[in-house]
Image (cartoon, rainbow, N blue to C red):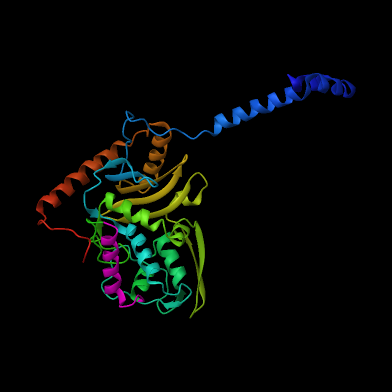
Amino acid sequence: MLARAFDQASCDDRAVIWGDFGVKHLLAACCLLTAVSVSHAQTPKAPRADSPAPELASVHAVVADFDTGATLFAKRADTVVPIASLTKLMMAMVVLDAGQPLDEWLKIVKRDGPIEKNAYSRLRIGSEAKRRDLLLIAVMSSENLACHVLAANYPGGTPAFVAAMNAKASELGMTETHFVDSSGLSPSNRSTASDLVKMANAAAHYSLIRELSTTAEYTMSFRSPAYTLGYGNTNVLAHGDKWDIRLSKTGFINEAGRCLIMIATVGERVVTMVLLDSFGTRSPIGDANRVKRWLETGSSGTVAGAARDYERQRTAATQVAVDAAPTRVSTGAP
């Protein structure tokens, strides 16, 4: 009404109109605008207790409140399965715990044993890179040879490095977790979704891991000889601005399926998501979005029938393996 009156009045009349309406009308208009803004900015409510559980393509999953530790959703969370490159979060913690200089130049060396599947690397054998850069491309871009170089340059070499990873797992209470290599290429690196929540939350307390894991892209410089290589984050959500991601790590080998760990802000809540063995290249991303939608609205949406079939097949195969395996006590130690 105030705007319409101003539009229809002459310059002289506007002064009168202003006086007639007075400051109190202006304040009332401001209050109305403020109320509208606040109503649109309100944080989405968490799912009610009677809200249906989210539908996810991942065979195993946990969604937890990062600050309180409360589990918001769990799905086959205690089944021990291969974890692929999610391993690299533990690798990064062990590297940083050692306190070795991050600006030290390390020589890129060949792997000691047979080359595993998915082990292709663009790093030139014999060239050199800084420890920090190797850690970056290992965590951000899942560069496996970088993990090997970092482990080989740990005091005591790779065997001591892997032992430190298992010791760290035990320290964190990851009782169903065991590592045999630093990168996750081995399917014998195994854990549960519940244990990986502990690992993710611990890694999130390292500011450098948070920074490196959420970096979108990086051009890395090498010496002897001098060359550069460009790298990108394997989590496509880290390339946009629709998510406030605190920590991120993807993983894949055939035995583990598509995996994703993410700590992100949804509304005013910080949540830890562990999504293991998803069907399809983008299924973990779809699951992350379904979790976000569920937290915001109480409904996740549905997954494709092919994903359901995959889940049934993987669950049956896992059960057969569990039935056939000898009983062992898992302590997180080598």
Q: Nearer the viewer, residue 30 or 133?
A: 30
Q: Position of residue 329 (x, y in %)?
A: 14, 58
Asked if residue 169 lies in the magenta stretch, the reply is: yes
Q: Residue at x 39, y 35 (%)?
A: 294
Percent of width and height locating residue 74: 28, 42
93 and 118: which is toward the camera? 93
The dominant secondary structure in magenta is helix
Q: Quadrant of the N terminus?
A: top right
Using the rendered view, name the quadrant where residue 92 is placed.
Answer: bottom left
63 relative position to 129: left or right: left
How many numbered callouts? 0
Q: In the rendering, at what x and y percent does residue 77 appear?
A: 25, 46
Task: Single out the residue that lies furthest toward the front.
Answer: 24
Which residues make up the magenta segment?
153-173
Residue lying at the far right of the rendered structure: 12
Query: Where is residue 185 drawn, in percent x and y?
Result: 29, 63
For residue 10, above or below residue 96:
above
Rendered position, 176 above or below 19: below
User: Is 14 left or right of 107, judged from the image as shown?
Assistant: right
Q: Magenta includes 155?
A: yes
In the image, 189 versus 20, the foreground residue is 20
Q: Which quadrant, please, contains the C terminus? A: bottom left
Left or right, residue 184 beside residue 266: left
Name the quadrant containing residue 186: bottom left
Up-down: is 84 above or below 312? below
